[in-house]
Amino acid sequence: MRNPLADRVVEIKPSGIRKFFDIVSEMKDAISLGVGEPDFDTPWHIREEGIYSLEKGRTSYTSNAGMKELKQEICNYINRKQGVTYNATNEVLVTVGGSEAIDVALRAMLNPGEEVLIPQPCYVSYDPCTVLAGGVPVPINLKAENEFRLTAQELREAITDKTKVLILAFPNNPTGAIMEKKDLEAIAEVIIEKDIFVISDEIYSELSYAENHVSIITLPGMRERTIMINGFSKAYSMTGWRLGYACGPEAIITQMTKIHQFAIMCAPTTSQYAAIEALKNGDSDVAEMRDIYNQRRRYLLHAFKEMGLECFEPFGAFYVFPCIKEFGMTSDEFAMRFLEEEKVAVVPGTAFGDCGEGFLRISYAYSLDNLKQAMERLGRFVGKLREEKNQ
């Protein structure tokens, strides 16, 4: 029998996150700090709107690009937050989570062999989605000494005559790093000069702690060369509702919608009704959850300081990225031994790119009680490793 599989699919490595959670799922009294999923229930008034839509029998397909009212509310939200205007009719696409938006954006924009610049450490889907779209992923290794922010020099050095797209993902998963306006202005000059495009993944935009999130679409010349992606999973604790969106130039959104039309048809109808309610009346819910995340963030940074574990201060998302290089172990070795000996699951930094070696991703989308128990175990484990090192 001939090989039924596509070579480029077989060659894609499985997610580096999963093996730890396959183990922890069967481990008694284990604590998992690895999943990037809010521990809050979706706010009741948002759930209620979804329930009401079902009671009213609103279970038909919507238009391919999404309900008109939802797309208008997305435009209202972006204008309220960023002062940028989009046309709801032809510059917005409602997708099945932000992940689908990333996938269809790359497929709509890339010709075979064109390069996509991917600052790392980063979300695990960017590289494989680029490959599946026929593109060539080109990593840009970010540095802890720069707080994992992309610099204009790093961007310029990575651009070739084949470069088509830069994926910009801030606040960042896994590092929690942010890009301030001055950072974005510096790289926007290079983007315009080199005539490349941006996919700006802003799924954590509402989880910025130092100041309000600034999108690159607000800068001169950038709205017309950016696909801005966001969604409802993180800000509104709506992960299972599977709803995201993309906003950008009509020429690109039209082609993204065509792919979405043939592959998906439309995003879930019930979720779209709930999302309208989230955008209209969910600001206070977001603010409350953000305050709680910030409390957890400050607790973890204090705990790391107490145990002498190096960690730069992240100002976004709900992750910390502590450095474990002092122990002379790979990230994978540290995480596996920590899981086996102390029953706490964290993610090796290498799951998010080779430059994540020597770091761990710890999510604080968990209760403070769980975090305190996990930090007690981490402190004990770190103390044990230091004793071993000094023997």
Image: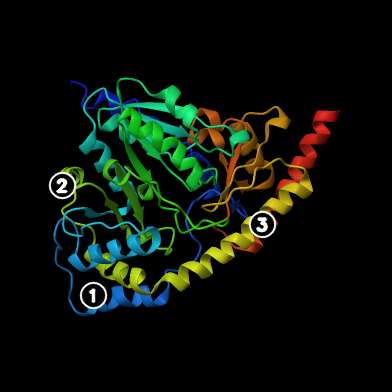
First-in-chain label (1 vs 3): 1
In the picture of the structure, the residue carrying the numbered disc 1 is 54
386 left or right of 260 in image: right
Q: Characterize the local packing of mark 2: few (<14), some (14-19) or many (20 or more) Cα atoms within 10 angstroms.
A: some
Describe the element under mark 2 as helix, strand or loop: helix
In this rendering, does residue 173 appear at all?
no
- Residue 175 in percent (x, y) is at 55, 43
Q: Which residue is drawn at the image coordinates 69% and 42% (left, top)?
A: 341
Give the residue displayed 33% in from the left and 41% down from the top: 199
Rendered residue at 35%/45% (across/down): 220
Asked if 90 appears above or below 165 in the picture, the reply is: below
- The disc, 2 or 3, on the residue closer to the chain's N-terminal end is 2
Q: Image quadrant for the C terminus?
A: top right
At a point 55% along the width and 33% down the height, the residue shown is 356
CA–CA distance in space, label 2 to label 1: 30 Å
Q: In this view of the protein, can residue 27 be seen by the observer?
A: yes
Asked if labels 1 and 2 touch by Cβ distance under 8 angstroms, the answer is no
User: In the image, which disc is placed on residue 298?
Assistant: 3
